[in-house]
Every structure is written in structure tokens, then in C-alpha cells.
Image: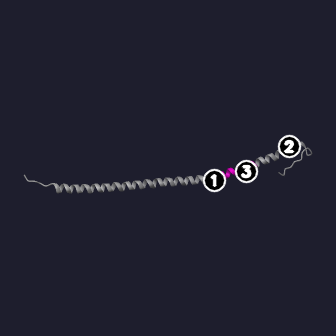
Amino acid sequence: MPRINLLPWREQERKVRRREFMVALGGAAFAAVIFVLGGKLLYSSWIDSQNAKNNLLKKEIVKLDAQIADIQDLENRKQRLVARMEIIENCSASGPRSCICSTNS
């Protein structure tokens, strides 16, 4: 019976499998890097978008705070005018000699 040496064939097959494994491993590593970078870009764009929205809201809040301050100032003026009107009405209702009205304040 002749003896056939299969060791070179097996060694060559191992080299081919090892090369295929390394190519697959490199492809998987490349895919993982692309996936991670894609996720980072996606989250970064979401964060930038949210920051832009937050900045817009902060600007609008500042505008609304200014409007609220104006409204409160107008309310204070209104209260002072109403108080003056009541003083004037009381003075005019009781007669010109019964009270001395001072509307300078």
C-alpha cells in the first residue's frame, strides 16, 4: 500500500483558512469602526440640534422676561393712575373747599 503524505495539503489548507479568518476579522473590525463612527456622528448631530433648540428657547425666554417686566411696569403705572383718579374723584365729590388735592406726587 502506498503511503500518501497529506501534511503539505493540510498545511496549505490551514494557511488559506487563516487568511480567510484574518480577512473576515479585518472586515468585522472595519464594520465595527464604521458603526461606532456613524453612531457618534448621529448622536453628535442630535446633541447639536438639541443645543440649537435650547439656545432658541433661552433667547425667547429673555424676550418674554423683558415683556413681563414691561407688563409689571405698566401694572404699577395703572395702579398709581387709578389711585390718583380716586383721590381726584373724592376731592371733587366733597367739594372744592373741603379738601386740598395735591396731584403732584
Residue 93 in the magenta stretch? The answer is no
Q: Mark 3 or mark 1, which is nearer the start of the sequence? A: 1
In this image, 77 relative to 57: left or right?
right
Residue 68 in the magenta stretch? The answer is yes
Q: Which residue is mark 1?
A: 62
* Inter-mark Cα distance, 3 to 2: 26 Å
Name the main secondary structure of what is drawn in magenta.
helix
Name the mark on residue 80.
none
Q: Which residue is mark 3?
A: 73
Q: Residue lying furthest top in this view?
A: 94
* Inter-mark Cα distance, 1 to 3: 17 Å
Under circle 2, the secondary element is helix
Q: Position of residue 53 (x, y in %)?
A: 55, 53
Q: Residue lying furthest left in this view?
A: 1
Q: Position of residue 99 (x, y in %)?
A: 89, 45
Residue drawn at (32%, 56%) of the image: 26
Tell me which amino acid carries mark 3: Asp
